Amino acid sequence: MPRITRAALIQASNALPDSTDLVAIKQAMIDKHLVLIAQAAEQGAKICCLQEIFYGPYFCAEQDTRWYQTAEAVPDGPTVTLMRQVAKEHNMILVVPIYEEAMTGVYYNTAAVIDEHGEYLGRYRKHHIPHCNPGFWEKFYFTPGNEGYPVFETSAGRIGVYICYDRHFPEGARALGLAGAEIVFNPSATVAGLSEYLWKLEQPAHAVANQFYVGAINRVGTEAPWDIGEFYGQSYFCDPRGKIMVEASRDKDEVVIADLDLDLIEEVRNTWQFFRDRRPDSYGPLTQG
């Protein structure tokens, strides 16, 4: 029997673009995503990934301590607890990117992974943290991830997570591939004029180099009051040959669905043998300094 996984990505705009009420924004975004998650389930998705810190705007466009109050514990905070119930209700695996508070003053950009029974499988903490113009002040908010590059065994395949800026670094993608990842999700918040030219280059390249599927998610719209640019959507799945299978629009809330043939991974790996032909004995300088 072919191993086919129907997977979903969700891209969405800020539900309350004119509001400064952090509690209201967070609740509105959660409510919006509950509807979109239900749509993914109705289309038969067995696994669904949300966008980076899905329950708010991309607040890293400013440096303001008020956003710390939107962080939560993982897995025991209210949002992951709710999403465990939602996953069980829809019999669907969820990848839920949120703002994590590990302890007072220590925060991570994190994605929780929940299985279809509502069980918390673990988390990935974003490793590579940008701090640059225009408006990507992430070191003000996030500690670099410290729990490696986990791969989660699920009924829909072995899945990994890489978050936004991580995608510019091939090393973590290779670590996920070597650990057996079959599907790697990259929830992002990225704007036109900066990285758009890389959006359909880097992640298909990771897919080819490691022979896994990639699900790339980007939010849509502009976000006041910062207006750092247009989040251009275009969320997509690509296959282990780097071919984009399905792609969303650049300006609409959307659920992206694709059927991923996991048996194709072995076929492509047997053809290219990139893992066999690696030379880790010669890579020592990559980790020096």
Image (cartoon, grey):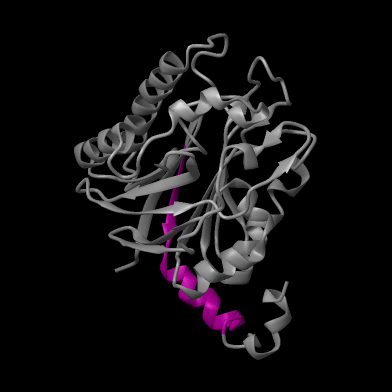
| Image coordinates for residue 285, horizontal then vertical, percent | 73, 80
Q: Quadrant of the N terminus?
A: bottom left
| Image coordinates for residue 48, horizontal then vertical, percent | 39, 44
Q: Quadrant of residue 289 in the image?
A: bottom right
The answer to whether 2 appears left or right of 139 in the picture is left
**Residue lying at 61% horizontally and 34% vertically, measured from the top left:** 233
**Residue lying at 35% horizontally and 25% vertically, measured from the top left:** 35
Question: Which residue is nearer to you in this view: 277 or 161?
Answer: 161
Range drawn in magenta:
256-275
| Image coordinates for residue 236, horizontal then vertical, percent | 57, 45
Question: Which residue is nearer to you in this view: 260 or 32?
Answer: 32
Callout count = 0
Q: In the rendered image of this protein, does residue 262 appear above or below residue 49?
A: below
**Residue lying at 44% horizontally and 27% vertically, measured from the top left:** 70
For residue 262: magenta?
A: yes
Question: Which residue is nearer to you in this view: 74 or 49?
Answer: 74
